[in-house]
Image (cartoon, rainbow, N blue to C red):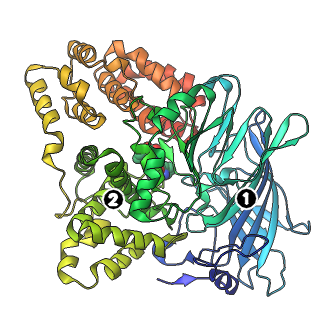
Amino acid sequence: MRIMFSAAVAFSLLAVGGCKPGAGAPEQIVAPVLTSKEASDEFTFARPQEARVTHVSLDLNLDFAAKEVAGTAALDVEAAKDAKEIILDSDGLRIAQVTDSAGNALKWQIGARVEDKGEPLTIQLPAVAAAQGVRKIVITYKSAPDAEALQWLAPEQTAGGKHPYLFSQGQAILNRSWIPTQDSPGIRQSWDARITAPAALNVVMSGIVEGKAQPVGDDRHRFAFRMDKPVAPYLIAIAAGNIEFQELGPRTGVWTEPETMKAAAAELADTEAMVTAAEGLYGDYRWGRYDVIVLPPSFPYGGMENPVMTFLTPTFIAGDRSLTGLVAHELAHSWSGNLVTYASWRDGWLNEGVTSYIESRISEVVFGEKRAAQERALAFAGVEKAIAEKGATSPLTALRTPDGTSPFDTETAVTYDKGALFLHSVEKIAGRKRFDAWLQSWFDAHAFQPATSEMFLADMRKNLVKGDAKLEAALMLDDWVYAPGLPANALRPDPAAFAAVDAAVVRYAADGTIPQREWASWSNAERMRFMQEMPEKRSSAQLAALDSGLGLSGTGNSEIRFLWLKLALGNRYDPAVPQAEAFLSRVGRNRMVTPLYQVMREQGAWGMAIAGPLYQRNRAGYHAFTRGNVDKEMGVKD
Ligand code: BES
Ligand code: ZN
């Protein structure tokens, strides 16, 4: 593996790790861009070997009426001496002008659109004194009203119902719709931003806040943020709305609408303990504060690990902290994903699988081994099911995904759960103490840098296996990462984890006995297991009995509600239709929304009579990511 950098980059590389910023402006850490084939990103137009962005400085106004962000992006660029131009990624950006730092116009051009990728924005580089290295370009621009990263919510889509709301979702390759930069995870950039918004709204970003909001004119105010560490550009995120803050612990807190605060803060009571647990496992939390924002329900994901400010769906609020594994997951990305980041989308498991493993380790510390073991068993069943569905020889079941796989189309059970199972299996074989020390050393050695599967395995061989031929053979490392299916050394879950539930499933399938008493004492994982394992075909009478026995339509737990609605719609159970309609009119979380439209479609005329009008009413309220997926289900052409 070769690391490429220009002379100027090589110079600033000296700052990576160790060096403290001196007085005055903070010193810029420049992370190297990997140039190995495995690290190449097919979803960017950028050619970082020639010229790369190292810092983004945003001055933007949020215009809720026009649904656009508008202003300037000033980019620091490191370029090879003879480089004449830099290529950025754009998706619908409306460029007004590009200048150098002195205001001299620079030539620019938007190239042809490529599906999924957007358009290249090619900018002539300003001339520069050779020794200086950094060149600045200033882009004046607007985002398009349908920018895919941004969701502009009408007041009716918020809990308060009075103010509009905005949030962004950058991962995977959506940030190019509101920030003109090189939108590739291996091209790390520090950033700062000044954001102007209506005075009634607060703004948060995935960086450290600088000072208090300053009034601008009568009815607007300006916020300032800074991220000094170089991050993957998909991690630049913003949210604005009628939101307030409540402390959770010394370095943790929650932002959300006043109407949601009480429930959100109660659900998040373990957040500080999670940070402490993660630090106990993998070393210092390096991002300063760990705050979360609980967004309106149209947020298309469960959570997003934006540094300093995890973004969360409100659907994790169950009232009993049973779904807060989601928070442990996003927090875990502070090591796997944000500190060390995949260089290309083919290595999704390196972020998500390693994170799911760490999530499990945090759960074990905070909630105990029993809950962690049940969650592992649930994940294992998901992996087996996915592999059975795709076929054990399908390349889609390998951790490293084939070239051309869309970064949005990865199979969760493989990327997340097979990825985590890999590390659980290595941990078991190598021993926990040794493995923990190695994983921490991996994060330390690659902090704030991009990585690949190849680097991960090479590092593991060098620093964990250390030439031990027996251990090497026992680990089956290459099989885990490159081969489809499940290696023979996969760690099997403890059969005791679900012994009670599985016995109840057998009883229920045999004579219809509903485990009404047990259900009350079961954990969330046990309840999910029961819902997943029961027979798929149910009569209306059987569904009515299940609902009244287990209180399914009354549940405040979105995971259970989702499984119930899937079962009910899959059996054309009319009494559940109003609940499904209410759920899908409120929640925009793709992992729940798309499968529910899918089951309805699978029910033919019965389902389409519900799904058609329902989607028509709600389509505009879903985030572009969810909308794109449901469009495919419903055969809607954009
Ligand atoms: N980083 C992901 C979300 C993501 C992945 C967005 C790939 C775009 C492309 C986030 O950390 C995540 O995994 N969210 C899950 C959480 C769950 C597995 C606990 C989700 O949203 O369901
Ligand atoms: Zn994740």
Q: Residue at x 22, y 32 (%)?
A: 530
Residue 160's x, y, as percent?
64, 23
CB at disc 1 and ligand 1 closer than 8 Å = no
For mark 2, what is the residue? 419
Q: Nearer the viewer, residue 635 or 504?
A: 504
Residue 314 appears in the rendering = no
Image height check: is 369 above or below 585? below
Image height check: is 9 above or below 285? below
Residue 479 appears in the rendering = yes
Distance (Cα) linking label 1 and label 2: 34 Å
Query: In terms of sequence position, does the residue under pointer 1 or pointer 2 come before the other?
Result: 1
Q: Which of pointers 1 and 2 indicates the residue nearer the eye?
A: 1
Q: Secondary structure at mark 1?
A: strand
Residue 320's x, y, as percent?
38, 31
Q: Amino acid at mark 2?
A: Gly
User: Which quarter of the figure has residue 457?
Assistant: bottom left
Q: Amino acid at mark 1?
A: Asp
Q: Residue at x 34, y 56 (%)?
A: 357
Q: Nearer the viewer, residue 369 or 395?
A: 369
Image height check: is 245 above or below 318? below
Q: Residue at x 48, y 55 (%)?
A: 407
419 with respect to 508 (left or right): right
Residue 19's x, y, as percent?
63, 79
Label number found at residue 108: none
Q: Residue at x 60, y 74 (%)?
A: 31
Q: Secondary structure at mark 2?
A: helix
User: Which quarter of the figure has residue 607?
Assistant: top left
Residue 565's x, y, as percent?
35, 24
59 with respect to 617 (left or right): right
Label number found at residue 192: 1
300 with respect to 207 (left or right): left
